[in-house]
Image (cartoon, rainbow, N blue to C red):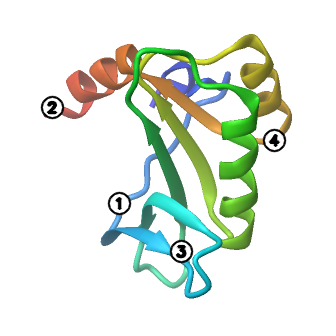
Amino acid sequence: MDGRIFGVDSPVKLPVSERVTSYLSPDGQVQVDSVAETSDAENHERWAVEIKWRGRLSGKKELEKLAANARSLSAKPWFISKMGFTQEALEFARHNDMLLSSQADLEVLAKLVGT
């Protein structure tokens, strides 16, 4: 996929996920909207996805929380924000290997995958 849909310059290979669930750690300290995993042992991938569907830009603090949660899960962080992101959040994502998508990006992605 075109990386611009995910806020990056290079192409992004979408995993074929066998399992997608919400996640709450046993101690209640780590909560992620969705964790998607492949079942292929050789190419195992895990993505931690956070979704904020509200009428304002998502900021750096929200991305920092997902980045920390994704690290604890050994997952690739993907933050989806309906309205997009503040400049500070965009810079944080670039320096922390995070994927970002807005509602407009998701609409493009949906057309590309045929949903």
Specify the farthest residue to the right: 95
Quarter of the image where one finds residue 53 = top left
Q: Residue at x 56, y 80 (%)?
A: 25
Q: Residue at x 65, y 28 (%)?
A: 10
The disc, 2 or 1, on the residue closer to the chain's N-terminal end is 1
Quarter of the image where one finds residue 61 = top right
The disc, 3 or 2, on the residue closer to the chain's N-terminal end is 3
The disc, 3 or 1, on the residue closer to the chain's N-terminal end is 1
Disc 2 crowd, CA 10 A, few/some/many (<14, 14-19, 20+):
few
Which callout, 4 or 1, points to the residue nearer the camera?
4
For residue 96, the mark is: 4
Disc 1 crowd, CA 10 A, few/some/many (<14, 14-19, 20+):
few
**Disc 3 from disc 2: Cα separation:** 25 Å
Q: Residue at x 67, y 62 (%)?
A: 69
**Disc 3 from disc 1: Cα separation:** 10 Å
Q: Are marks 3 and 2 in contact (CB under 8 Å)?
A: no
Compare residues 111 and 33 and report the one nearer the observer.
Answer: 33
Quarter of the image where one finds residue 99 = top right
- Amino acid on which disc 1 is placed: Val
- Secondary structure under tag 2 reads loop
- Amino acid on which disc 2 is placed: Gly
The disc, 3 or 4, on the residue closer to the chain's N-terminal end is 3
Q: Which residue is mark 2?
A: 114
**Disc 3 from disc 4: Cα separation:** 21 Å
- Amino acid on which disc 3 is placed: His
* Quadrant for the N terminus in the image: top left
Q: Which residue is mark 3?
A: 44
- Secondary structure under tag 3 reads loop
**Disc 4 from disc 2: Cα separation:** 30 Å
